[in-house]
Image: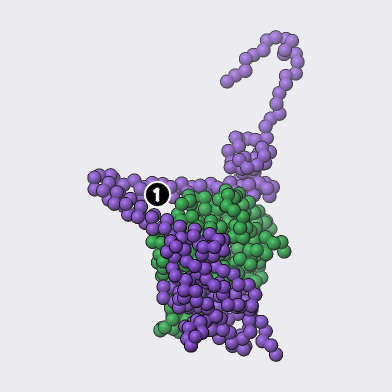
Amino acid sequence: MTEPEHTDEAVSGRSRASRDEPERTRPYRGWWGFFRPWEDAARGAAGAGRGNGEGPLQSVVDRGVELGYKVIDEQIRQGQRAAREFSSQTYGPQSVNRDLQELVFRSLRYYVDMAGLWMDFLGSVPGSLGAMGGPFWRNAGRWQPPPPEPAPPAAGGAASGGAEVAVRLSRPARVDLRLEPGAGARELRVPALMASEKGLPPITEVVYEAAAGGGGPALRVAIDDGHPPGSYCGVVFDAVSGVPCGTLRVDLHEPAS
Amino acid sequence: MSAAASLVPEVLAEYGEITRSALQAYLPAGEPRRHHYDLLGDYPSRGGKMMRPSLCIATARSFGARLEAAVRSAVSIELMHNALLIHDDIEDESEERRGRPALHRLHGVPLAINVGDTLGLISLRPLLDNRVDIGERLAMRILEETERMALESAEGQAIELGWRLDNCCDLDDEDYLVMILKKTCWLASIHPSRVGALIGTRDSIDLDAFIRFGFFVGAAFQIQDDVLNLGGASEAYGKETDGDLWEGKRTLMLIRALNVASGGERQRIAELLALPREERSAAEIRWLRRLLDRYGCIEYARQIAHGLAGAALHEFSLVFGGLPESRDKRFIEGLVTWVFERSH
């Protein structure tokens, strides 16, 4: 579009108001403008325009981020394209029937999952399965017998059995045993207690002892006198199902001389 | 050290211990021990940062899941990571891993490949066992996610190996980001956070946002890792110093050097990279290292990493911002800055 030519002398004799030439050489289309003030967007675009980061360090940062978004957005687009291709099947009567069966099957599975979710919810209600924030009870400090297990919910949670699990050590140590409700009634297995500090050997001998002679079940942790002090932790499994049901932590100090 | 800065190592140690302990249960014993089963536990027992399993557990917990629901997936991720490390070390001709000779340097390539194969196979077992903890449908979704991660990682490794095989010297930053997206970021951060979110939300959230967050964290992590490889003392870093230059890895620094060096220098770099590793001389590697310094390539890479970390924090706010405050949420946010504070 061309400017109309002014012929009026009064107008042409005055200096015309004009804008400074903009610093930008092209529109700002980078993502940076969405999150930064206008000036920063200008800086980012200027940096991007200088090729492979030859400008100030800030433009290097901007360019890296811009490139990052370009790469990752392309990856997401590719994933969406692949998903569309997988989902765009030909639909004949047979496939509709198949999809219906799949829908029914999926609904059933969702129902099963929702039941599990409901049980999780019950587990988080104070006074039902444990304290808010998780089903584990905490037992800080030197090991104490676990508190009585709360009654199972009327909705049919696993019977807790109320059994207490003792921890027997061959060396004095601070113990923190956390078991989910009901775990005390099952046979337990602890493969190893791993050290939090790099290079320390694990404690590998943790043996479950079933209740016998009137005593309750126990986890016996055998620790050599020469085993280095440190913090050791392991997952407690249900020995039969292999499901994790708690954690055991042993803080081992220097043996008393 | 600030509370946020100390939280990351603390959570890494805690979730790392739990994962390592649970992992023990998946390492078979028996014969043949000397040439196989005794070697399975070698890399997992060498320590490691445990970022991958910790990110999986923390993401699941920040969405409200129980720790136990995520432990098996975390074990699988760690097993797969160790399996790929063994194969990567062979393919990259690496000499050290976590401060000790690489597995193939200790026992030879054939046994190491076999151990890597077995660890990869074993990594599927916890995912099958997931059915007990989180239900069949979710367990199957995580298996699908794992399949995708494994494919992306293999593609990334193939891209990088192809560059070295063809002695590619005309790469740019975008090529590099695409490569590490696949080779590193999927297993390091995208997959753990997606699996954690699947478990935490019971597959009720759009996972694309986790690709963005995981990519930016993982890319910043990888670039910082490459920077440490050039600058870090071998003992703290756990790999040989300048090992990436010896291996001819196309890092962001090397790509930058290839783009800004003079024609003669570029030619000399290309000739050096064309040689087999054992024929590269220490003097030439030192020259290349000085060239990277002269052109500010390390600082350049560091600045790119800082930018990516900033984007990671932005994506974090989009994905996790609406969740209630928790230790796990603070840990995930803290990971972004911890990437630069670590020395190994």
Q: Is residue B182 visible?
A: no
Q: Quadrant of residue B115?
A: bottom left
- What's under tag 1, amino acid-wise? Ala
In the rendered view, tell whether residue B131 sits above or below residue A40. below
- Asked whether, in this view, residue B42 is left or right of residue B309, the answer is left
The chain letter of the green chain reads B
Q: Chain of mark 1?
A: A
Q: Position of residue B206 (x, y in %)?
A: 48, 49
Q: Is residue B5 visible?
A: yes
For this orientation, the residue located farthest to the left is A93
In the rendered view, tell whether residue B243 sits above or below residue B169. below
Camera-side residue: A177 or B283?
A: A177
In the rendered view, tell whether residue B72 sits above or below residue B253. below
Residue drawn at the location 58% of the way across and 38% of the way down: A29
Camera-side residue: B103 or A223?
A: A223
What colour scheme does the image use?
by chain
- Asked whether, in this view, residue B333 is left or right of residue B117, the answer is right
Which quarter of the rendering shows the N terminus of chain B? bottom right
Residue drawn at the location 58% of the way across and 56% of the way down: B217
In the rendered view, tell whether residue B333 sits above or below residue A206. above
Q: Position of residue B94 (x, y in %)?
A: 54, 71
Q: Which residue is mark 1?
A: A83
Mark 1 Cα shell of 10 Å, populated few (<14), some (14-19), many (≥20): few
Q: Position of residue B313 (x, y in %)?
A: 61, 52
The chain letter of the purple chain reads A
For this orientation, the residue located farthest to the bottom is A257
Camera-side residue: B69 or B277?
A: B69
Q: Position of residue A101 (x, y in %)?
A: 29, 51
Q: Quadrant of residue B268?
A: bottom right
